[in-house]
Amino acid sequence: MRVKPLVAVMLCLVAASGKALANAPCPGPAAEAPTVRLAGADAGGDLLLEDGRRIRLVGLAPRQDDAETARFVAALTAWQGRDLRIVILAEPDRWGRIPARLLADPAPQATASVDLSVALIRSGAAWHLPDSVSSPCDALLRASAPNTAPSARQNGPKPANLVDGHDIAALKVHAGRVIVLEGRIASVGERPQRSYLNFSRRRGAGASVVVSRRLWREMREVGWTARTLTGKRVWARGVLSGPDGLSLELPSRAALELID
């Protein structure tokens, strides 16, 4: 049979495309891109343009409660009515939202455009949460968040939504919310469809980061294997879920950071 060589070629192409996406620059607006204007936000906190389109700013976590939604919507008021450039990054999702970036022209004496997502993160109106579409822009968004420099990760203040992956009571309280999970990986379980980065060798005694087969393949390609990750302290961004509230499904490779 000559199936295996063909499969090998296909896997190489998939891996190459994943690397290219991760290493691609954050897309900017085309020179001829038309301007749009922000009308506000809908009841769910998604952006509405004056032309009627709904926008999902990539790399931002969904609002978790009324207080977060109110803070996010209030921060948008400064941007309403301004000319913005739109960078569409993917097809509309199943809710009709367009994954995109919105950028304002540079301020006087400045050279770089102002990214709306960066401004919202810096003001504390939004959290950064990597996703499959935001990969090329994740470095920019991560750098915008406070307390993300290496020195801050080691010694400085921690993110407000940081949860100890070994604190079962705290994990139960945060079930269903977007968090930054912190813990030391005690073991790695590799399965055909997904892998598990376990913070405890004893089931139920700590959280686990769930990694899809595709993401696990990407991680191994850059040297993150079961052997190299075991014993490492990490931050993992995502939604805490699972039947016991102790699992965090990793949304992208950029959502996992090695702390030491």
Image (cartoon, helix red, strand yellow):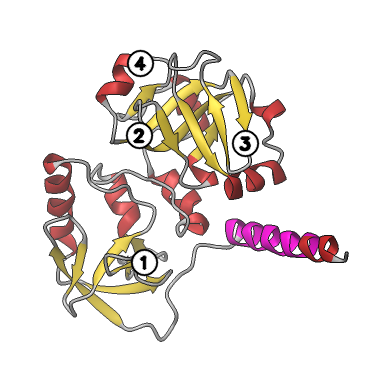
Range of residues picked out in magenta: 8-23
CB within 8 Å, label 2 to label 4: no
Query: What residue sits right under mark 2 in the picture?
Result: 241
Q: Look at the picture and state if 31 lies above or below 121.
A: below
Task: Judge left or right: residue 154 versus residue 217.
Answer: left
Query: Which amino acid is tagged 4?
Result: Ile
Q: Residue at x 30, y 62 (%)?
A: 56
Query: What residue sits right under mark 4 in the picture?
Result: 168
- Whole-number angstrom distance, CA of label 2 to CA of label 3: 19 Å
Q: Secondary structure at mark 3?
A: loop
Residue count near mark 2 (Cα–Cα under 10 Å), binned few <14, some 14–19, many ≥20: some
Which quadrant is the N terminus positioned in?
bottom right
Query: Which amino acid is tagged 3?
Result: Arg
Of tags 4 and 3, the one toward the viewer is: 3
Residue count near mark 1 (Cα–Cα under 10 Å), binned few <14, some 14–19, many ≥20: many
CB within 8 Å, label 4 to label 1: no
Q: Specify which label sits upstream in the sequence, 1 or 2.
A: 1
Q: Secondary structure at mark 1?
A: strand
Please check the rendered image and state whether residue 13 is part of the magenta-colored stretch, yes or no: yes
Q: Specify which label sits upstream in the sequence, 2 or 4.
A: 4
Q: Specify which label sits upstream in the sequence, 4 or 3.
A: 4
Query: What residue sits right under mark 3 in the picture?
Result: 191
Task: Judge left or right: residue 153 versus residue 168.
Answer: right
Circle number at residue 134: none
